[in-house]
Amino acid sequence: MPASAAQPAHTPPSTHVEALAALGVQRRYRRGALLIQEGDTGDTLYIVLQGRLRAFLADAGGKELTLGTYGPLEYVGEMSLDGGPRSANVEAMEASTCSVVSRATLLDYIAVHPEFALELMSRLIRRARLATESARSVALIDVYGRLARLLGELAREPDEHGERPLKERLTHQQMAQYLACSREMVSRLLKDLEIGGYIAVRERWIWLLKPLPARW
């Protein structure tokens, strides 16, 4: 998923994840396919081999909040391995291939490699911290503040001109889903920042030209 409201969650792959993926069943998913539905009961872990997945929450009116995005050798679904209901929806952002690992296979693997349990626990703790920070941001920081934080977190190191491109190309709708606000609000703020000379959009890619103002 961003500390602004949700955050793309990227963690370094481990040899354990690769080994565990080899024990699962490979499945392919088209773009937009729903792998996990919030509230369902499930006991499988999805390890991304190719493509990207998005975890999100949605209300009855269709409003969505992105919790994180996951690429190759990252995994989702571990929150329900205690037998409880799924805590979020997960969809394929693009055509994706995953290794689907059952709870039994995961437990057998941990029995042989108990150190992986610590790795899994560390990941759950990081996710819990991100969720706490996301809740704090939505409750205490205004939309512009969340947008500025999101852009700062996604920006690469400055180039020779001091300009910072984002690490990925996000649509205004995707940003709105991260920030828990409307697409129209994101579009208006970005346009204002562009007019003010703070950002530039080049081939649909956002560049930060200079430090963003603390308030707008």
Image (spheres, rainbow, N blue to C red):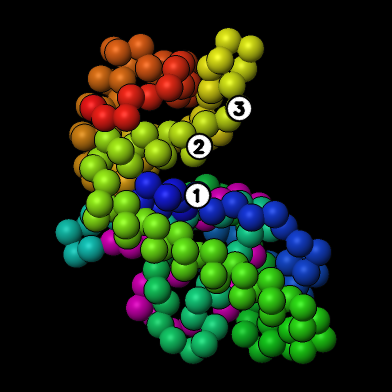
Helix, strand or loop status at disc 3: loop
Could you say where residue 195 lies in the image, as x and y percent from the top left?
A: 28, 12
Question: In the rendered image, which residue does mark 3 sit on?
Answer: 157
| Range shown magenta | 36-58
The reply to whether residue 34 is in sight is: no
Q: Amino acid at mark 1?
A: Pro
Q: Amino acid at mark 3?
A: Glu
For the point 39% across and 68% down, which residue is it?
Answer: 88
Taking the view exactly as shown, the residue that stands out farthest to the left is: 61
The answer for how far apart the CA atoms under marks 2 and 3 are is 10 Å
172 or 152, nearer to the observer: 152
Q: Which mark is residue 158?
A: none
What is the crowding at mark 1: few (fewer than 14 residues within 10 Å), some, or many (at least 20)? many
Q: CA distance from mark 1 to mark 2?
A: 9 Å
- The number of numbered discs placed on residues in the rendered structure image is 3
Q: Are marks 1 and 2 in contact (CB under 8 Å)?
A: yes
Q: CA distance from mark 1 to mark 3?
A: 17 Å
The residue depicted at 19 percent of the width and 64 percent of the height is 60
Quarter location, residue 211: top left
Which badge, 1 or 2, is on the more N-terminal residue?
1
Q: Which residue is mark 1?
A: 8
